[in-house]
Amino acid sequence: MESQSRRRSARAKADLAETLRKAWYHSRLSVRDPRRVPTWDAIVLTAASPEQAELYHWQLSRAKRMGRIAPSTITLAVPDPHGQRIGSGAATLNAILALAKHLHHLDSPVADSSNCNSSSTSYESSNNEIPLLPLVDLMGKKHILLLHAGGDSKRVPWANPMGKVFLPLPYLAADDPDGAVPLLFDHILAIASCARKAFRNEGGLFIMTGDVLPCFDAFSMVLPEDSACIVTVPITLDIASNHGVIVASKSGFPDEKCLVSLVDNLLQKPSVEELVEHQALLDDGRTLLDTGIIAVKGRAWVDLVILSCSSQPLISGLLESKKEMSLYEDLVAAWVPAKHEWLRTRPLGEELVAKLGKQKMFSYCAYDLLFLHFGTSSEVLDHLSGTGSGLVGRRHMCSIPATTVSDIAASAIIVSSKISPGVSIGEDSLIYDSSISSGVQIGSQSIVVGVNVPGAQSTMALNSFRFMLPDRHCLWEVPLVGCTERVIVYCGLHDNPKNSLSKDGTFCGKPWKKVLDDLGIQDTDLWGSKEVKDKCLWNAKIFPVRHYPEMLQLASWLMGLSNQEDETLQLLWRRSHRISLEELHRSIDFSQMWLGSTNHQADLAAGIVTACLNFGLLGRNLSQLCEEILQKEFTGVQMCKEFLSLCPKFQAQNSQILPKSRAHQVHLDLLRACNDERMASEMEHKVWAAVADETASAVRYGFKENLLESSSWHSTTLHQVNSFDGALNQSFQTRKVTVELPVRVDFVGGWSDTPPWSLERFGCVLNMAITLKNLLPIGTTIETTTTTGLLFRDDAGNELYIDDFSSIAPPFDSCDPFRLVKSALLVTGVVNEKILQSTGLKIKTWANVPRGSGLGTSSILSAAVVKGLLQITGGDYSNENVTRLVLVLEQLMGTGGGWQDQIGGLYPGIKFTASFPGIPLRLQVIPLLASPQLIKELQQRLLVVFTGQVRLAHQVLQKVVTRYLQRDNLLVSSIRRLVELAKIGREALMNCDLDELGDIMLEAWRLHQELDPYCSNEFVDKLFAFSDRYCCGYKLVGAGGGGFALLLARTAESAKELRLLLTENSDFDVEIYDWKIFLDNHF
């Protein structure tokens, strides 16, 4: 049974949504804070030609602009020399050499720093020999991601112009609806960012392919020292027979999800007999698939650098002999002794064995790896409608008509496109980077890319011709060098352009013989009179180059939708200049294609902004959209200036329901887009003033702005004042009140309690009141005195006497150690001549917790002082009233902040608190009735650890609030998820499921870093990494940045072991506090 259970576990694949989200979290964090979360030193793409390399350079620059590659990372696109194919192995050597030369150039004193981190180059013109040793020293310490993206995408021909690695893959697109549609490349980058951790500080190379998205837990990847390592996954034999297979040694180092073993042999498309002969079968009957992911580090990496940096003569030899050297057959074989004899017969085989053969290759088996291959057009649609369908953003950055004037299937995917009324689109079709005019019909399971059908289809009347794309077809356009018209290209979804006329080749889903017969043409019309070795779609001159309307008509004819006996169309086709896919690939005008796509995206963004300003409530991220608009040459800034002129109009239209803070933020974003920094600076002050006003309106409901001068304030508190005075006169000599409160630790939900979020959206927090070292650490003592005046003391030795009460007035100096007490006197109404005319108060405060603890100390101390003042004056000191008054107090102090801290300290035990937006802000505190079992287990397994780190402010609150006001979609979705997790965490605690609570804490911690990358630091990362094997969850409390950490151990025994290890480990100067859940207000 145990063996069967292990096998079932080994067959379980990674959860696509969870894996991708974790990878994207990590990728964004590594871009925003690469010093703490190391990223790649360089990202290199191989390309088929210098022209394609230039296109890739633009794509890499785009990725940097959008924050998907760190600014410090060097990016390079390297074509095969002279655009001649040399094979993936030789391309690897060429790319490493090109990067080495590029880095050497950057290190030279004459290097141009204006564009040093991004380039596309082949270094073909460089005849200057660079000494080998400096290059090796330079490269040996670098961490490099190499992505092979230079092959011909013959089986995904519509992706050939853009490069298959840059095809649209709108997984998780809904997380950022105002951003560009995610590409396959972006997802690969995210997964690769997690693999960087496996290299630690040792230089190396990580190789991936541009047509595979390998979804697996790359964080856990183990790379043996001084060796190469290939990532494998168990696969069934039918799939293995068409791919590369790794024969791994039976002795390995087993782990829960992986196995690291020495590679004994490599097999290519093996039969079952070959698998048996080479002992390649696993115990469960499967075998190990070569995923195309290769890591090289240590001595093996240095050897590869040495070979690459001296490879120019070797590559020249390949070019002269017109041979190729494969990465997956030839180069990796150098690290497998069993392949050396065979390798020596191959191109460059002797050199590979001599230079690389001393090191070994290992297999890292990722049992959970989900292998998404984008090798054919049908596979692309399968991945969008199958396993990952729930992740797909089906409408993203697009303009689509109402359902009453169009027929668009709900399952159709329309991204970065404009659809006119009167268009029909079938089920599961993909429309990308296109403009489709009225009257066009697109069938089901079809792909349309880069198509721009003119609005009135030029000179043709719509009623005389309507273009239709049949089911299961692909349609795309390509600009050609020297051609004014973009060429329309098409084929069937399942057509394989490599299949020959004699071997089941098809065009638009029909066998070639039927196509020729139906059209009344000869094979010589397509392939010429000379003998052609393989007559196939790839080299068939079938696509006419004419005026756009004529190309549309001929496309319908060729696809079999028009009268195929029409001699007029046949004659028009014969007289046309025609081009094949092969010729097309060599003649693409990449600069025109990129410019057209960029302007198209800018126009779409401009349309969204226009609609948002004219009709909406500004729910879109205009700052992000304007970045896209500004990419449009010449007119981008002018478009933003036109939007700026609309600001007075939308503010006037929506003044009753649109928060001023949001309206001002839109104005600010548009000013910045127009480069008007002076006006933007003035508007920024208005933004923050509006936030303060809106918060004050919600929390001071019933109070006026100036608590000292407002007649309304005095009238509403007159009765309280009189009763206070009577109470003091009766027994002031013996009146003394001490209020002691616990601190709070938060499990999840923080930030949803913070204005302006909590003023506009639902929020909830799950937190707990605790004692430290068996004491209530926060408190105040307030006593009356026979002499008038106020005397303040705190635990830092500060002391202040006040006899002029008029000096207690906001705004308070941020350095005033007693501004908290002064604010408390104001909000409770104690600063009143009638109350203090014949008596005084002595107020002492303390907080026996380290500074910057993150335990809500300031708010809880405020609650203690307010509660004490109300008690000694006979006021309403209920938790509900105190909570509300502390919100007012924090506004007076100017510190802002949310409501969870004072609730965490005022209410005992574990509680789930929800806030409901509106005026006034309403709160609902729901105590969780914890069972003795839960309390015992929680106190045994949860470690409360002071990290010793001073919390770094980094203007965290201001940055997060600014992103919210901009409607940063990633921030909004992150806080929404924190709210959802708080609800899930409540159920987990009630079910005594601390393991699930641990998972929630981990996700909450990732989300906090999404909100602010500086909420952690290297020390905290190191502490959590050390604790990971003992814990099911961990996070810093509060906003993070330092202070206290919560470590939820897997078991009580794990908690004891971890406590001991942290105490004894000199690397961690931390203090582990004894704590208990505070359950009783009468502690």
Image (spheres, grey):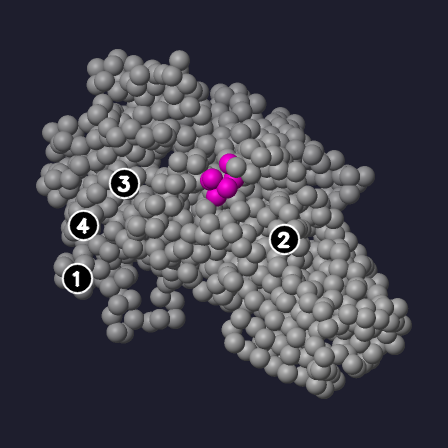
Indicate the quadrant containing the N terminus: top left, top right, bottom left or bottom right. Answer: top left
- Counting residues from the start of the chain, the first of labels 1 and 3 encountered is 1
Q: Residue at x 63, y 53 (%)?
A: 904
Q: Residue at x 66, y 38 (%)?
A: 929
Q: CA distance from mark 1 to mark 2?
A: 60 Å
Q: Which residue is mark 3?
A: 223
Question: Which one is in front, 68 or 224?
Answer: 224
Specify the amino acid type for callout 3: Leu
Q: Which residue is mark 2?
A: 904
Specify the amino acid type for callout 2: Gly
Q: CA distance from mark 3 to mark 2?
A: 45 Å
Specify the amino acid type for callout 4: Val
The answer to whether residue 683 is visible is no
Locate residue 835, reporting x and y percent. Answer: 80, 76
The relative height of residue 45 versus residue 884 in the rendered view (above or below) is above
- Counting residues from the start of the chain, the first of labels 2 and 4 encountered is 4
Label disc, if present, on residue 302 of the rendered structure:
4
Q: CA distance from mark 4 to mark 1?
A: 12 Å
